[in-house]
Image (cartoon, rainbow, N blue to C red):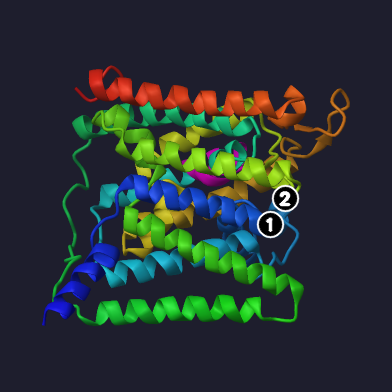
């Protein structure tokens, strides 16, 4: 029947075929504005830190590290719940497209996954956020530390690719696959139905929280549902910030980078309206690590995401797709982030202090808060600087696509 075939075509276009990066960027931009309007910024690292805190608490490392325990419940921590939603959304999307499969990588890739997770945990702690909370959230909330991490991740990605090339030439151990599972077995007819059940469970969970009489749970319900939407969009568009920073250096392709730029543009304009109209405060993304912590953390994080083959959000949705390497990355990211944060606080490196020279601002030993509308005394110049930096990034990407001037793989 023709109408059944037509429905199948629409189903494939939405749930099976990969969405263009620009579509992913547009949808993610609107989701960033939506979560901001709901009352917080998009984040991943805070949730992973919560999981790492629980691991340290359960194995008895909390006291030596100075972590007061037990930690907040992962089901009550908003960033953790957002990441759980992301996992559920990506898992359901992978099942609907029959792209879920357990993928066991070669031993060397497992080691790189662990190293990448450790580096990302250290880098994200120093910049007080991963590629999402340390870069996207501050940039779209007009905190200059986000641009510091952007610069650091560019440098880190270039260094990471250099190291990757060296490794390919000099290390032969552990490259043979142990086991491989088909990701698109056409006989897996149960997967779409299981995906629908996962969607329904996530929606039911979110609505249950939203309709709760407890105010805190209402907020968390929205966070969970928006997090689930993030997971769906990230998986269907295969959107990953490691590709946005890696591909221009590796193959001269800027398509994912352009999608990221479009996403940030939409989020900047949307969040600016919300803050300017007083609809939402900006304090969530005011990280006092500009410039040293944001740049150095970005460099370390950038190297880590190249080794792992995924950023923080990218590692989550790929893990939900069945990649063992990225599951290893998440475990080491969460544990290292928890340990490193505890140590930096213990050593007074990340302890917050009032900046006596700039009333209303804060500082740590890794930098200061730099809220552009306040420092520039102008929303006009804030948008000029933000959009100007975005335009420079776009021009450099287009220039590199045409000339391959910044490609390090020749």
Q: Quick check: can you spot residue 309?
A: no
Q: Is residue 273 above or below residue 406?
A: below
Q: Residues within 10 Å of mark 2 (few under 14, many from 20)?
A: some
Left/right of residue 139 with respect to residue 235 in the rendered view = right
**What residue span does the magenta drawing correspond to?**
119-133
Q: Which residue is mark 2?
A: 280
- Helix, strand or loop: magenta stretch: helix
The residue drawn where x is 23% and y is 31% is 251
When asked about the image quadrant of residue 19, the answer is: bottom left
Residue 115 percent location from the top left of the image: 41, 44
Q: Is residue 325 above or below residue 120?
A: below
Residue 84 percent location from the top left of the image: 51, 66
Check whether the beta carbons of the residues at disc 1 and disc 2 lie within 8 A of each other.
yes
Q: Is residue 308 magenta?
A: no
The residue drawn where x is 16% and y is 66% is 182
Position of the N terminus by quadrant: bottom left
Count of number-bearing discs: 2
Frontmost residue, 232 versus 119: 232
- Secondary structure beneath dot 2 equals loop
Q: Which residue is mark 1?
A: 39
């Amino acid at each position: 029947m023709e109408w059944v075939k037509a429905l199948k075509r629409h189903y494939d276009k939405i749930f099976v075929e990969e969405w263009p990066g620009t579509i992913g960027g547009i949808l993610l931009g609107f989701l960033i504005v939506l979560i901001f309007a709901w009352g917080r910024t998009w984040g991943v690292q805070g949730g992973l830190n919560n999981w790492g805190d629980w691991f340290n608490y359960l194995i008895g490392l909390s006291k030596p590290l100075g972590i007061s325990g037990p930690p907040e419940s992962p089901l009550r921590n908003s960033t953790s719940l957002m990441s759980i939603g992301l996992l559920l959304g990506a898992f359901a999307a992978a099942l609907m497209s029959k792209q879920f499969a357990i993928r066991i990588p070669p031993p060397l890739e497992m080691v790189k996954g662990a190293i990448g997770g450790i580096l990302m945990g250290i880098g994200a702690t120093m910049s007080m956020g991963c590629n999402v909370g340390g870069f996207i959230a501050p940039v779209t909330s007009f905190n200059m530390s986000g641009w510091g991490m952007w610069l650091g991740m560019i440098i880190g990605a270039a260094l990471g690719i250099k190291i990757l090339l060296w490794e390919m030439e000099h290390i032969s151990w552990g490259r043979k696959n142990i086991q491989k599972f088909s990701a698109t077995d056409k006989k897996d007819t149960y997967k779409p139905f299981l995906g629908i059940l996962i969607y329904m469970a996530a929606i039911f969970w979110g609505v249950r929280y939203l309709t709760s009489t407890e105010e805190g749970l209402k907020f968390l319900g929205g966070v969970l549902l928006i997090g689930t939407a993030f997971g769906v969009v990230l998986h269907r568009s295969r959107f990953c910030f490691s590709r946005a920073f890696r591909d221009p250096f590796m193959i001269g392709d800027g398509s994912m980078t352009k999608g990221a730029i479009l996403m940030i543009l939409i989020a900047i304009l949307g969040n600016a309206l919300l803050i300017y109209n007083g609809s939402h405060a900006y304090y969530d993304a005011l990280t006092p690590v500009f410039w040293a912590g944001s740049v150095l953390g970005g460099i370390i994080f950038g190297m880590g995401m190249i080794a792992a083959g995924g950023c923080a959000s990218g590692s989550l949705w790929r893990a939900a797709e069945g990649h063992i390497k990225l599951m290893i990355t998440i475990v080491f990211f969460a544990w290292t982030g928890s340990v490193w944060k505890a140590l930096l606080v213990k050593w007074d490196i990340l302890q917050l202090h009032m900046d006596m020279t700039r009333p209303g601002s804060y500082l740590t030993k890794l930098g200061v808060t730099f809220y552009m509308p306040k420092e520039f005394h102008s929303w006009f110049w804030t948008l000029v600087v933000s959009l100007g930096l975005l335009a420079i990034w776009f021009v450099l990407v287009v220039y590199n696509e045409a000339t391959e001037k910044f490609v390090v793989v020749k």
